[in-house]
Structure formats: structure tokens, C-alpha cells
Image (cartoon, rainbow, N blue to C red):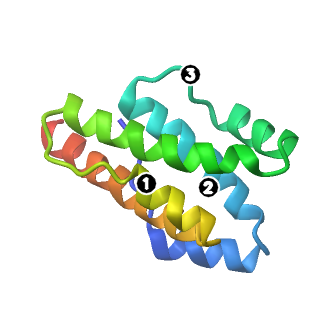
Amino acid sequence: MVKEKNIAVSLLLMIVTCGIYGIIWFINLTDDVRTISGDNRLSGGKALLFTILTCGIYYYYWSYQMGKSIYNANVKYGKTSEDNSVLYLILTILGLGVVNYCLIQSELNNFSSVSKLEG
């Protein structure tokens, strides 16, 4: 399904590359959420483009939508979960988008470990 990524290494790469790895991580997160949720409307490239074209406004919607998509994927696979979409939106409003990346990656890593056990 999705490949597990080390959150600490991703944060370190983001710092070392002055945020450039953050763009790559953003795209990968979006594509991985698309993979687990089956929502073909999601695309990392499109999300980045829309964020740039709207001067960052789309990023607020993206944060909320990631929470909804992860929740729906958890329900789809019969896992208990909370809908964190509002939390992701609030963190984005507070300027803590990198915390969203970590939380989303943690959820994706849970899906990665489940697929290893099933496979």
C-alpha cells in the first residue's frame, strides 16, 4: 500500500534543505493518502499547484481534506479512528503545518504496518 517513512528523518531533511524537502513530503503525503483512501480527486502535484495559485489558501482546504480522507480510509478498512480534520485545520491556521505533516505521516505509517502484517 504505502511505504513507511521515518518522521524524524523527514523533519531533519526538511530543516537541512531549508524547506525544499517539505514540498516533496507534501506531494508524497497527498499521493499516499490518495492510495489508502481510493480518492482519485487527490493528487500531490495538483495540490501543490493549487496552493501556489491561490497564494496558500488551498493549503487550508488541503489540511482539512487530509483529515477527512484518512478518517474515511480508516472506516473503509474497519479501523477505529477519530476525525482529525478540524485539528489539522486549526494547526494550519496557527502556522503549525509541519505538525500536520507529522500526524498525517504517523497515520500513513499505521497503514503501512497493517499492510505488512496482511502481506
Say which of 107 and 114 sits in front: 107
Labels 2, 1: front one:
1
Q: Which residue is mark 3?
A: 41
Labels 3, 2: front one:
3
The spot of residue 80 in percent (x, y) is: 14, 46
Sequence-earlier tag: 2 or 1? 2
Q: Are marks 3 and 2 in contact (CB under 8 Å)?
A: no
Q: Which residue is mark 2?
A: 25
Q: Is residue 112 left or right of residue 80?
A: right
Sequence-earlier tag: 1 or 3? 3
Residue 28 appears in view: no
Check disc 1: other Cα within 10 Å, few if <14, some if 14-19, many if 20+.
some
Identified by mark 3, the residue type is: Arg
Labels 1, 3: front one:
1
Identified by mark 2, the residue type is: Trp
Q: Which residue is mark 1?
A: 86
Q: Are marks 1 and 3 in contact (CB under 8 Å)?
A: no
Say which of 70 and 85 sits in front: 85
Identified by mark 1, the residue type is: Val
